[in-house]
Amino acid sequence: MTRATWDTRLGFVLAAVGSAVGLGNIWRFPWLTATNGGSAFLLLYVVVILLVGVPGLLGEMVIGRRSRRNPVGAFDELGGRRFRALGGLALVASVVVLSFYTVVGGWILRYTVASATGAYFEAPQAYFAAVDFGPAAAGFHALFLLATVAVVSAGVDRGIEVATTVMVPGIVLLCGGLAVWVATLPGSAGGYEFYLSLDVAYLRANFFDVLVAAAGQALFTLSVGAGAMLTYASYIDEDRSLVADGTLIAVLNTGIGVLAGLVVFPLLYSLGVPPGSGGPGALFVGLAGAFADLPASRLVGVVFFGVVLLAALSSAISIFEVLVAYLADEHGFDRPRAVVAVGGLFLVTGSAAALSPSLFTLLADTMANLLLTVTLLGFLLFCGSVLGRAAIAEYERGAGRVARLASRPWYYAVTVVVPLFLAFTLTTGIEGLLGVPVSTAQAAALAVAVVSGTTLATRYRADTA
Ligand code: PFF
């Protein structure tokens, strides 16, 4: 069976942007910015995206394009059987992320429909409390999953590429339209102030915490650590600049996140709703409830939740595809059979998360970030110590002159700097999971172990090459 490929370069970029732009941008990112120092945070975030996110993303893409396989097959192909477990970790991460993501996707689907009838306008709080978990939530989750299945089953170029080529421009246009429209509403000005005011003092006082939050967000939003970008890059069949593509993906992703904030906060301010403290309640209760007071309330609700739905769906298909690629490459499943098997799996895991708030919270709040970080750490250490020069060669394949100049700095970034940084952020994730503080000494020990291990491995490789 010949392996699928993207039809066009733009198709790949839009599919990857579709994966990156999701719930993380439209909801989490604006809130993180507003509550962490406004434009001062934005500046720090851009630095984290450029120094940690983009090199990490390139690391995943290098592994995918070089191997042309799914995560498990990729590590086998490039490093040997003993590295298959690293790909297995990515599969686990993708199951964890998609199992809660489809539940939220179900909520959004429900709110898109409910906006048309105004069902939640009267009592937004009670409405959300009635629909968030339970059999109906499991039902809407299943519908969202069905939409994901429909796209993925049509294939990489005919399904994912075609769908995201329509969806991503749709997100930008609708979101841009909403941003312009809310600017005309009376009282919206305070929203911009709340969102982007420069609070350097806050950032200075909480630098480390904010940095860790920014790092977690950078990984989640760029879809790295679950093998989605690895899998998408494995369908590239041309020599083109991964650096150019990766940077473009990161820039578009950040831009759409900023745009979403330019809709949310001015809207809340113009309606006199206090921004509160973020989280699902703020999206489904604060903001949704506010729609009721607008002139074209139902239309605004449908458009707003429609945008979020497109964003969530284009991300969900990328995670789903990871497992489909695995079954196809490693176990010889044809696409229809693989899609049914993966769909069946998520029907079970997602329904469990839709019925159990505690499972949902465990997956969404603790396990997802932790797994994405651990997996990416493994990917990058593999790039540095096992791939070595081959990683640099793959990075340089198709790259322009400027991008080539950055190949060594990139290599050292993914071999030492980014792993060190990830090891530090990991300690906060472990704290969250165990509920006990991890001391600075432990964090430092972990970091030293990572750096010395990588440096040694890299040196060994250079010596024996
Ligand atoms: N990037 C997506 C978002 O910001 O919502 C989430 C995501 C998609 C995470 C794909 C991981 C992944 F592999």
Image (spheres, rainbow, N blue to C red):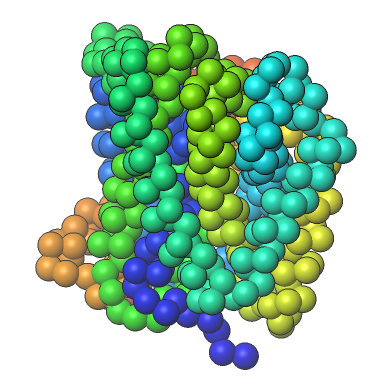
Q: Which sits in the foreground, 460 or 286?
A: 286
**What count of labels does the image hold?**
0
Q: Quadrant of the C terminus?
A: bottom left
Judged left or right of residue 434, residue 423 is left
Q: In the current view of this chain or complex, which residue is farthest to the front? A: 295
Task: Please report the residue visible at 25 percent of the width from the left and 62 percent of the height from the top.
Answer: 244
Q: Residue furthest bottom?
A: 1
Give the quadrant of residue 50. top left
Q: Residue at x 49, y 24 (%)?
A: 295
Residue at left offset 34%, top offset 72%: 9
The x and y percentages for residue 263 are 39, 30
The percent position of residue 271, horizontal first and vertical second, equals 45, 14
Residue 163 at least partly seen: yes
**Height in image: 353 above or below 377?**
above
- Report whether 352 appears left or right of 206: right
Using residue 295 as the reference point, say whether residue 47 is left or right of it: left
Quadrant of the rendering where the N terminus is positioned: bottom right
Residue 48, position in %: x, y?
32, 37
Give the quarter of the image for residue 255. top left
Where is residue 23 shown, x and y percent of the image?
A: 53, 40
From what the image shows, is residue 314 above or below residue 5?
A: above
